[in-house]
Amino acid sequence: MKRILLFMTAICMTTMVMMSCGGGSKKEEVKSEEDAYADNEIAEPTGPSSEDMIAEGKTLVDANDCKTCHHPTNKIIGPSHTDVAKKYEFNEANVQLLADKIIAGGSGVWGEIVMNPHPTLSHGDAEKMARYVLSLDGEKEH
């Protein structure tokens, strides 16, 4: 029975690897040099807020193949996103660690099941996804 389960898991994971899209790339608006200069003259540029990045991360998680293996609160193939948030403190080092894991994939932290790599995701998008996941236990970034 255990061999059958492992065999079916391997087939499922292979199928998901072959079918996963890894996320699409967004087209960025291209501004002329004059427009960019004018924007800088009006106000100092500010980055998106933590809440904005978390919201963008949720959108990216929903748009990618994450839900194939992860659920916000229940274990499916991989751990629930909330369990990930409980395991890792919400700080910049862990955002970077999880973003790297999202892009590279891997195994061993949550068992022997392999997480698919997502090499087409930008590191910035992977960071937003990691911030969303780390926010699910209610902890604020520090």
Image: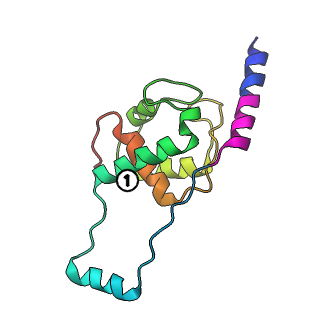
Q: Is residue 104 left or right of residue 48?
A: right
At 23% from the left and 76% from the top, the residue drawn is 44
Principal SS element in the magenta part? Answer: helix
Task: Point out the residue furthest to the top here.
Answer: 1
Q: Give whichever of 22, 6 is nearer the camera.
A: 22
Mark 1 element type? helix
Q: Is residue 94 above or below residue 80?
A: below
Q: Give whichever of 113, 34 is nearer the camera.
A: 34
Q: Can you see residue 103?
A: yes
At 73% from the left and 18% from the top, the residue drawn is 5
Q: Can you see residue 130?
A: no
Q: Is residue 17 above or below residue 46?
A: above
Residue under numbered circle 1: 92
Q: Is residue 91 left or right of residue 63?
A: left
Q: Position of residue 46 (x, y in %)?
A: 27, 68
Q: Position of residue 137 (x, y in %)?
A: 33, 33
User: The N terminus is located in which quarter?
Assistant: top right
Q: Position of residue 84 (x, y in %)?
A: 45, 35
Q: Amino acid at mark 1?
A: Glu
User: Which contiguous range is marked in magenta?
Assistant: 10-21
Colouring method of the image: rainbow
Q: Give whichever of 137, 32 is nearer the camera.
A: 32
Q: Is residue 93 above or below residue 80?
A: below
At 28% from the left and 80% from the top, the residue drawn is 39
At 39% from the left and 87% from the top, the residue drawn is 33
Asked where in the image residue 38 lies, by quadrant, the reply is: bottom left
